[in-house]
Amino acid sequence: MNSGRSSSSKFLLPLLFSVFLVLGILIGIIFSKPHWISKSLQTEGAGYSELDYLLQLIEENYVDSVDIEDLKSKAYQAFLTELDPHSTYLPPIDNSALEEEIAGEFEGIGVQFEIVRDTVMVDAVLPGGPSEKVGIMAGDRIVEVDGVSIAGVGIESQDVVKELRGEAGSTVKVGIKRPGSSTILIFKIKRDKIPLNTVDAAYMYDAKTGFIKLSRFSETSSKEIEEAILKLEEKGMTRLILDLRGNPGGLLSAAIEIADEFLKNEELIVYTQGLKREKEEYFSTNQGNFEGKPLCILVDRYSASASEIVAGAVQDHDRGWIVGERTFGKGLVQEPMPLANGAALTLTVARYFTPAGRCIQRSYEQGTDAYYAESVIIEIKGDTTPYYTDAGRIVFGGGGILPDILVKEELEPSELFLDLYSTGNIQEIIFNMTQQFRAKWIKKYPSALDWISEKKAWENEIKAEWLKALNSAQKEAWNGQPKSQPIVLQRVEELLARNLWGMVGYYQVANQTDPWINASIRALK
């Protein structure tokens, strides 16, 4: 999955060995009571942990300065990694971010950004949010915050978030550099509560087919899905494609509520059980808004946890088609446990099972590296016991949900695009093209669907501007892979649509050539 995660065990095992080694030495220290142990430690009462004792020794005696909280976090995580890949220690700042994501909102100015060449570039502006209200647009560069320059100073994403977020009602002055303007534009923005929407896009793919993209499962997800379904049905939707690709999961309760949208009354959705947790079963109700109608759920190797609960319930009840790649295979349930100072422990307490009785947790016996390896598992590994759907079809557990319709993975977005990306300013080129064409296209094309329907009118102009902006190294890479050039231009068009019409625009363009979508349409028809 994530390359940062996949490499973590290289450091965790030596760290764990070191911690136990030091604790072994510490046992001898405790019994010998050397004269230099601080008075406070000698008089500590029962309950003072060896780890606390060790950390205080380090803090009071180590030769160099050390971040005790960081050391503590790494030690805790080293212990937890020995249990399973998903039990995690969250320092206060990470726990706070997780709580915001689960709650589905935060307080800030309402922009999505990325850092390109030491410059904060606005990817998207939340519709109706504080930034859109004052006139900030996708493609703008944030160069100042409250009069202090943040461009070209090596600023990190977390630093930008810290500067832009704040209590609802408070204000911040943001300096914007906009292509075509020679001066820095100053915007005074009043912060507000910003919803972290989990439905990235919902639109009619054709006259009968609705498309909904869900990015994760939070407290607001089931309400967002319900509202999206009702709005699309008003537009004539009689069949639905629910896109769970890349969705890493989230709240179990959200997965249950979303599965309930599609299942008949009193159908088992999922059950959980652990050594110290009794079996709990969760059933559908009569509240579903899309029961019995044609349904496809898109999944890939990054669809995990709550995504697999929904896909597993739909598959086991033969309710719809599962389309794509075998899913990740996370069948463990974590329970958040608050700790001191705002930190938290998310501890695995149970496994979940699909209605047919499958536990789809993939094996982690070979260590974290193997567990998070980015590979598509087609063959059955682990549990080869046959399970049966309501219609008697055989399905298996032991490593994710195997789709009903497998889609061969295509390079995304192609090796050529990655080659170009690695040589520098691709994002900057696309941002500049956004600003260049914004006024003309927004006025002429109300939506990305209108834009893409008249592709012949502008595709040569896009290609000419793109080639003109490439540097010499990028042009060399471009000329060396002529067969991949159309794929790259398609990717450029998708990103331009995102900048101009938001995430709905992105999917309206991307889905035109998406093999997952094409396979789903064939199945639904």
Image (spheres, helix red, strand yellow):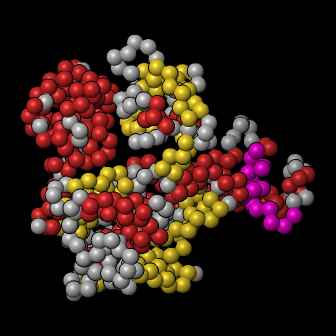
Q: Main secondary structure of the magenta part?
A: helix
Residue 127 screen position, x and y as percent: 40, 42
Question: Going by the picture, which residue comes out furthest to the front?
Answer: 234
277 up-or-down from 83: above or below: below
Q: Residue 170, percent across and down?
A: 62, 36
- Along the line of sight, the residue nearer the viewer: 20 or 509: 509
Q: Residue at x 24, y 31 (%)?
A: 443
Q: In the image as oriented, which residue stretches furthest toward the top?
A: 182
Depth order, front residue of 296/54: 296
Extent of the magenta region: 45-59
Q: Residue at x 56, y 56 (%)?
A: 99
Residue 238, horizontal then vertical, whole percent: 20, 67
Q: Is residue 289 left or right of residue 279?
A: left
Residue 137 placement, left or right of 86: left
In the picture shown, does residue 325 fall above or below 174? below
Instruction: Residue at 86%, 55% (x, y): give it.
Output: 41
Q: Is residue 65 visible?
A: yes
Q: Does residue 127 sit above or below 354 in this rendering? A: above
Where is 341 relative to 49, above or below?
Answer: above
Image quadrant in which the N terminus is located: bottom left
Residue 422 picture quarter: top left
Q: Which quarter of the rendering shows the C terminus?
A: bottom left
Q: Is 310 displayed left or right of 410 in the figure?
A: right
| Residue 77 visible within the image | no
Where's residue 308, x and y in %? 35, 68
Q: Does the segment drawn in magenta span residue 49?
A: yes
Image quarter of residue 309? bottom left
Q: Nearer the viewer, residue 53 or 518?
A: 518
- Residue 12 in the magenta stretch? The answer is no
